[in-house]
Amino acid sequence: MRKLSLFIITLALALPLAVLTLVILAVEDHPRVDRRVILTPEHMERAKQIVDAHRDWVRPGMLASARIMPADADLAANYLANRFGKGSAQLALADRNAVIRLSLPLNGYPLDGYLNLEATLIETTELPQLQSVNIGKLSLPDALTDMLLPQLVRWLRDSPEYRTGLDTLRLVKMSPDELSIFYRWEGGVSDEVRASVIDKVERERLLRYQSLLAANSRRHGAAVSLAEVLPPLVRLAGERSVNGEVLAENRALILVTTFYVLGISLERILPEAAGWPRPARRTVTIDGREDFAKHFMVSASIAAYADTTLADAIGLYKEVEDSRSGSGFSFNDIAADRAGTKFGEKAVASESSAQQLQRRVAAGLKDSDLMPVWSDLPEFMPEAEFKRRFGGVDAPAYRGMMQKIEQRVAALRVLH
């Protein structure tokens, strides 16, 4: 009996010590990977080519493939690590395997420091398998990894949006030249998946702003300024912003307004919205221009729901595309993009920032509060003219123009 008691006491003392040892080995005081996320128009163009190839020739039931350049796969890994974990990642492709390095800040949950993970993904006849997993100075036995990975896959399959992606994947092949993803597309996205992206509380928020927007739209003429559309919605957000929900309320009103400005039904992302009140179709403008309102709200929505790096890259990519085959490169459109990005960023940066924006908008707006002075900014430039005058998106003349735009956007009353 005495031996059993001694064993229990020893075990009780050893377990906390073992856990502490594991924490010390796993958590480090600095990131091993520390990289900025840099998205360029060229990155956006390559991503668009992959999407366009799928849309143009992939049919339901067809086995298809997407081939991704090593630099783009590495960029995607770093972007996702930054977007979802505020960290950094690095992906290196080799023959039939890839090495992923990931650094995630803990920010006091449950302690300060970084989780630095390094693992090798091995190509198989189906999906890749994890090997040689290290967390900080701690190496996980392959037997433990083999046990944990199937459990992770099962957990992901419990969620409709992840389950659909996993069920679509057939094979991943890796080489130093490309990452090839083979998938079988069954067509469309199910209502279950679309609905699962937005939870019940968020759907109720969207319905509130949609209903108010529908009622207000009946009182507007054929064209209405965004400066008239936003204040009533923001006043409602202020009334509903209790219990720390100010950021969520701002996101919801921005999303509803964006779909309204674009003339797109929320049914596209939420099937049940088909039965919601429908706003009357109106042309929404800033300074009398519909394109400015669209640029502003799309960038605001991306910034509110994603991050400013992606919002900036998408806006710049559109202008480069326009310079090639569309309306031409326009710095005033870039100004609308940047103003919208800053608006969306301020709306969700913190509770105090979100509340400050609510008070400013609720007090009333003018177009000049949303859009900086733009009449002297060059627009509708074909690619050749844009390069002749500004030398491309990395040249000093371009950077000078962007600095001028940034200064004007920073001075907008709505952001103060």
Image: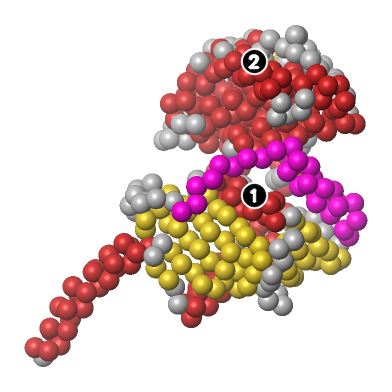
Residue drawn at point x = 61 percent, y = 53 percent: 77
Task: Say if 345 sits above or below 226 in the image.
Answer: below
Residue that label 1 marks = 75
The residue that disc 2 covers is 404
Place residue 320 in its image quadrant: top right
Please rate how many residues cluster around mark 2, counting C-alpha atoms within 10 Å: few if below 14, some from 14 to 19, many from 20: few
Residue 289 image-quadrant placement: top right
Q: Is residue 102 a member of the stretch shown in magenta?
A: no
Q: Quadrant of the N terminus?
A: bottom left
Give the residue at x 51% y 72%.
132
The first of marks 2 and 1 along the sequence is: 1
| Helix, strand or loop for the magenta stretch, by majority | helix
Q: Residue at x 72, y 12 (%)?
A: 374
Q: Answer yes or no: is residue 91 visible.
A: yes
Is 58 on the left or on the right of 207, as rendered?
Answer: right
Q: Is residue 154 above or below residue 228?
A: below
Q: In terms of secondary structure, where does tag 1 sit? A: helix
User: What residue is drawn where x is 17% and y is 79%?
Assistant: 10
Q: Which residues are magenta?
A: 32-59
Q: Position of residue 179 (x, y in %)?
A: 72, 62
Relative to the observer, which residue lies in front, 162 or 103?
103
Q: Nearer the viewer, residue 45 or 303?
A: 45
